[in-house]
Image: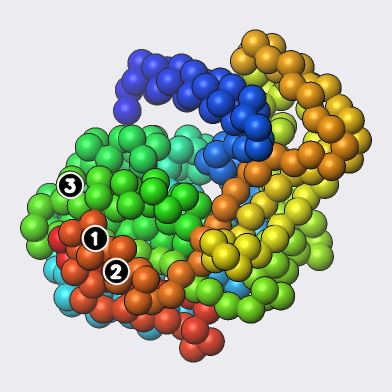
Amino acid sequence: MTEADLESHRTDVAAELRADVRTGLTAEQKWLPPKWFYDAEGSELFEKITAVPEYYPTRSEREVLAARAAEVAARTDAHTLVELGSGSSEKTRLLLDALTAHGTLETFVPMDVSESALAEATAAISADYPKLEVRGVVGDFTRHLRLLPGTAPRVVAFLGGTIGNFLPAERAAFLRSVREVLAAGEWLLLGTDLVKDRETLERAYDDAAGVTAAFNRNVLRVINAQLGADFDPDGFDHVARWDAGHEWIEMRLRAQRDTTVRIPGAGLVVEFAEGEHIRTEVSAKFRPAGVTAELATAGFAVERQWTDSQQRFGVSLARS
Ligand code: AVJ
């Protein structure tokens, strides 16, 4: 992107945050979209979450990718690897190594809403893979998919279980939109966290060191910084609950007392009663057969499906 593009992108992003805050914080049941966690600080906190002992998804997915990356390369003959929500692109190296060794890869396209995380990742990958063309895209993968460059066949990797952060209807729409930008014979590599016991799940989202709690509260700091709000993040408790009916983890921020928050950038004054919460994230967990069915509905055929040795996390390779 040029500086002018970046600048108009930032304006876009600010307007979107304002709209999301207005919609979410004036709703009967208050909520905020999880993508606003990820400013520079939030992206760093997420990286720290991936290292806490309770948060297994990153390690479980890495185990699958380490075991299967060569098979992904052999089956897909990918010329382009696109990574949606790439963050630090750390697990992606397993794929880049395999695809480079296979000899077909030309271009890597990491896409992320976090400009800082993307800049760091792009620089690091370029340095380590000098023959690879690296084309970072700052953008929201729910809206900017059409911008994806690279020659076919492309593999679009959507890892980490981030698909679980969509609500079911958004998830269906998203998978369809990915299918629509791909030509027949291109690929989606999808990471999905799997349904398991409540204790393991709730611990993963409420670690003893409090990193996830800080990550959750960070969304209030983002709103303070971007919209001039006066949230006291420490006045909200971090809550993570397994919802067995929906099969998702729900993260909330719960007001410790009656609170009035001013959000001038959104033209809002928001009242919280003691105990009232903002839903800040859902993280859906999946069953392998359900993933296959949802992908089929979107127009993908699952060719391979893998899990780690403890069957905690799934990775599906699907053909469009
Ligand atoms: C963005 C999907 C990787 O839902 O597990 C981690 C974000 N939230 N801890 C997830 C998150 C709380 C995460 N992913």
User: What is the spatial separation of the Cα atoms under label 1 and label 3, in whole angstroms?
Assistant: 13 Å
Kindly identify the residue that appears in the image at 62 percent across and 15 percent down: 266
Q: Which residue is mark 3?
A: 180
Provide the secondary structure element on which disc 1 rests: helix
Report the disc number at residue 293: 2
Q: In the rendered structure, which amino acid carries the disc numbered 2? A: Ala
What kind of residue is marked 1? Thr
Q: Which mark is residue 62?
A: none
Instruction: Write down the residue under mark 1.
Output: 297
10 Å crowding of disc 1: few (<14), some (14-19), many (20+): few
Q: What whole-number distance in Å separates the C-alpha atoms at marks 3 and 2?
A: 18 Å
Q: Residue at x 17, y 47 (%)?
A: 180
Badge 3: residue crowd in 10 Å (few <14, some 14–19, many ≥20): some
Apparent side of residue 153 relative to residue 255 in the rendered image (left or right):
left
Measured as percent of width and height from the top left, residue 168 is found at: 42, 53
Of helix, strand and loop, which one carries label 2? helix
Tell which of 225 and 199 is nearer to you: 199
